[in-house]
Amino acid sequence: MTEDIEGIRRQKLAELRNRAETGGAEEPASQSPSEPVHVDGDAELSETVAEYDPVLVDFYADWCGPCQMLEPIVEAIAADTDATVAKVDVDANQRLASDYGVRGVPTLVLFADGQPAERLVGMQDEAQLRSVIEEHA
C-alpha cells in the first residue's frame, strides 16, 4: 500500500513539474470513463462533477429490482456517450441521497456545467437517457 502511495506521489509531482514547465497551461478536460464510477460521499461526487461534464448520477440500491434492470443501460451510456456515469449506493450514502432529495430508487440526476439539470425517477429506457444527455451535452 505504501508503494502505491509513493507511486501516486511521484506521478503527481511529475504532473506539477510538467505544468510549471508549460507555463501553468491547463490540461484539456478529462475524457469521461467508459465504465460507471462508484462514488462514496459528497466529496467524491463533487470531485466527479467538477472533473467531468455532463455527469449522470445513478442513485441505486443493491436490493432494488428496477436498479438491477437499469444497470446494463447505464453501463452502455457510460461506454457509448461523452457522459460520465456515477453510481451512488443509497444505503451506504443515506445523507448524500437525502441531500439530493432521493426518495425512491432508482433516481437519476444529470449534472451539466456542475449543476443538477435533470431528475429522472424510476426505470428509464436507454433512448430516454441518451436524449436527456444530448440536451445538456
Image (cartoon, rainbow, N blue to C red):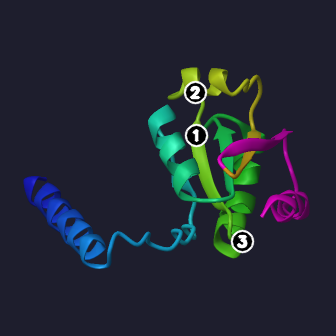
The type of residue carrying mark 1 is: Val
| Vertical order, 48 against 62 (above or below) | below
Identify the secondary structure beneath mark 2: helix
Query: Mark on residue 2?
Result: none
* Residue 121 drawn in magenta: yes
**Residue pointed to by mark 1:** 88
- Image-quadrant location for residue 127: bottom right
**Residue pointed to by mark 3:** 81
Of 29 and 84, the residue lying toward us: 29
- Image-quadrant location for residue 5: bottom left
Question: First in sequence: mark 3 or mark 1?
Answer: 3
* Residue 127 drawn in magenta: yes
**Image depth: mark 3 or mark 1 in front:** 3
Whole-angstrom CA distance, mark 3 to mark 2, is 26 Å
**Residue pointed to by mark 2:** 96
Whole-angstrom CA distance, mark 2 to mark 1, is 9 Å
Question: First in sequence: mark 3 or mark 2?
Answer: 3
Disc 2 and disc 1 in contact, CB within 8 angstroms = yes
Disc 3 and disc 1 in contact, CB within 8 angstroms = no
The magenta-colored residue range is 114-137
Whole-angstrom CA distance, mark 3 to mark 1, is 19 Å
**Residue 67 rendering spot, x and y as whole percentages:** 72, 43
